[in-house]
Amino acid sequence: MPQNESHTVALFENEGMDSPISVLKRVYGYPVFRGKQAAVIDRVVSGGDAVVLFPTGAGKSLCFQIPALCRSGVGVVVSPLIALMRDQVEALKQLGVRAAALNSSLSREEFIDVRRAIARGELDLLYVTPERIVTPAFKETIGNAKISLFAIDEAHCFPVFTVLA
């Protein structure tokens, strides 16, 4: 087994029971939360809802990524920006997080691989575009998956028709 795969398995073998601060330190390498991150993350980890408006670079992504890693199941992140989605998924994989994306840039084979990973419970975070999340195929894909949370990233970029769909 490649070192990265071994790290991923060991990192999350306790099925999402880590505390937010331990995930922050072990996965991201940061010693403490910044600003209001801890309050937001604690609320989401405990099952609450949150609307997070932080300036660029203030760590909004950690406010849904860490709760998803602390809870069992897959965190579904709706994001309209495929390039940002690709960058976040790649960065998360480098940290040992089992992340993937479903968007129009995937080949058919990649799409099938992601769907299989969802069905087998092999993902911690799944990034998906707004137009995909409202399809019957996506609903079928996640129908039996254990969902740890839903997050909407970059909500200001969502077209109005997506919200109304």
Image: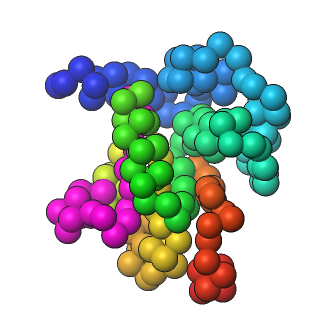
Residue 28 seen in this snapshot:
yes
- Write down the quadrant of residue 92 in the picture: top left
Looking at the rendered image, the quarter that the C terminus falls into is bottom right
Q: Is residue 78 magenta?
A: no
Q: Nearer the viewer, residue 2 or 83?
A: 83
Snapshot colouring? rainbow
Residue at x 45% of width, y 74% of height: 132
Q: Quadrant of residue 142?
A: bottom left
The answer to whether residue 19 is seen in the rendering is no
| Quadrant where the image shows the N terminus | top left
**Image height check: is 48 above or below 109?**
above
Front one among 102 and 121: 102
Magenta residues span: 96-114
**Nearer to us in this view, 135 or 117:** 135
Q: Does the stretch in magenta take in 101?
A: yes
Q: Residue furthest front?
A: 56
Q: Where residue 151 appears, x then y in whole percent? A: 63, 56
Horizontal side of residue 47 vs 26, given as left or right? right
Total count of labels: 0
Q: Is residue 71 above or below residue 77?
A: above
Q: Is residue 13 above or below residue 154?
A: above
| Residue at 31%, 52% in the rendered image | 117
| Residue farthest to the top, as pictured | 31
* Residue 78 percent across, percent down from the top left: 55, 61
Residue at point 17%, 63% (across, down)? 109
In the rendering, at what x and y percent does residue 4 appear?
28, 25
Indicate whether 25 appears above or below 52. above
Residue in view at x 58 percent, y 50 percent:
148
| Image position of 5 (left or right of 79) | left
Residue 160 pos. (x, y %): 66, 81
